[in-house]
Amino acid sequence: MTEITIGILASFGAIFVLLAAVGLIRMPDTYLRISVTTKAATLGIGLLLVAAAVFFKELSITTKVLAIILFILLTAPVSAHLIGRASYFSGVKLWKGSVLDDLKGKYDKSSHKLKSDIEEAPEKKANKIGED
Amino acid sequence: MTLYDFLYYIILPILSISEILIIIRFLQGPSIVDRVIALDLIITTGIGIIAVYSIITNRPTFLDIAMILALIAFLGTVAFSYYLEKRNK
């Protein structure tokens, strides 16, 4: 029974890692490749590590595996955000089929600051108060 | 078919094929960001290979190395993105 569980978990993990690799080859755009790295690979590695935890059946190793999974779950989105931000600044083009670019014209390319609507709101309020 | 055979002859080859596909993207990546992502994914797949290998050889000590590799992957990506932003400033 344990062996069947390990086999199923390892199969799904390997399939997800393979899908992540195929996605990294086939995706047309840098940003889409970043999304592949964060989602599919994280799930695949998590399943493989859970298979190892089920195999050893010791508290210390299960704790270690859970720590690795938690660390990967925490760091994958952070690193994806950082590398996506860096690629947006270095001028990597979006895929021609992309529909929407929310950040277009909002990033100051020299100072790397984001102009958003929230920042502009207090000025409008101040102007209105001044007019009254 | 024992668990050893299943892991050794099916799971490890699948992971190796995915590693080769990622290395192809690492070599041909159009921008440097693609190479950084491919490097991150190479190390992440390496963690999975280490997990499977620790089951095959029945040595749980290998999982320590997996933990350190996860740390190094995160630090490498953060450092690369930091210096890529600095370069374009």
Image (tube, coloured by chain):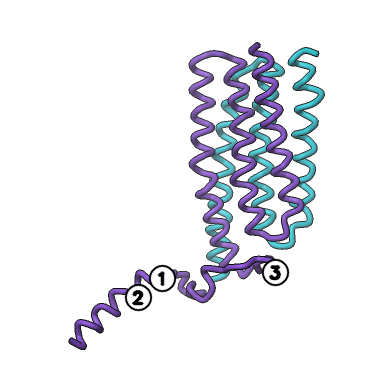
Q: Residue at x 68, y 37 (%)?
A: A16
Q: Residue at x 49, y 72 (%)?
A: A107
Badge 2 amino acid:
Glu
Say which element carries label 2: helix
Mark 1 is surrounded, within 10 Å at the Cα level, by few (under 14), some (14 to 19) or many (20 or more) other residues, namely few
Q: CA distance from mark 3 to mark 2?
A: 31 Å
> Which residue matches tag 2?
A120
Q: Quadrant of residue B31?
A: bottom right
Q: Give the letter of the cyan chain.
A: B
The N terminus of chain A lies in quadrant: top right
Chain bearing tag 1 is: A
Q: Quadrant of residue B12?
A: top right
Badge 1 amino acid:
Ser
Chain bearing tag 3 is: A
Where's residue A31, x and y in %?
63, 58
- Give the number of the disc on residue A116: 1
Label 1 close to label 3 by CB (< 8 Å): no
Q: Give the letter of the purple chain.
A: A
Where's residue B86, x and y in %?
53, 65
Callouts 1 and 3 in the same chain: yes
Badge 3 amino acid:
Lys
Chain bearing tag 2 is: A
Label 2 close to label 1 by CB (< 8 Å): yes
Q: Is residue B28 above or below residue A119?
A: above
Q: Residue at x 67, y 19 (%)?
A: B55
Q: Is residue A111 above or below residue A35?
A: below
> Which residue matches tag 3?
A96
Which is nearer the N-term, disc 3 or disc 2?
Answer: 3
Callouts 2 and 1 in the same chain: yes
Which residue occupies the extreme bottom position in the image? A131
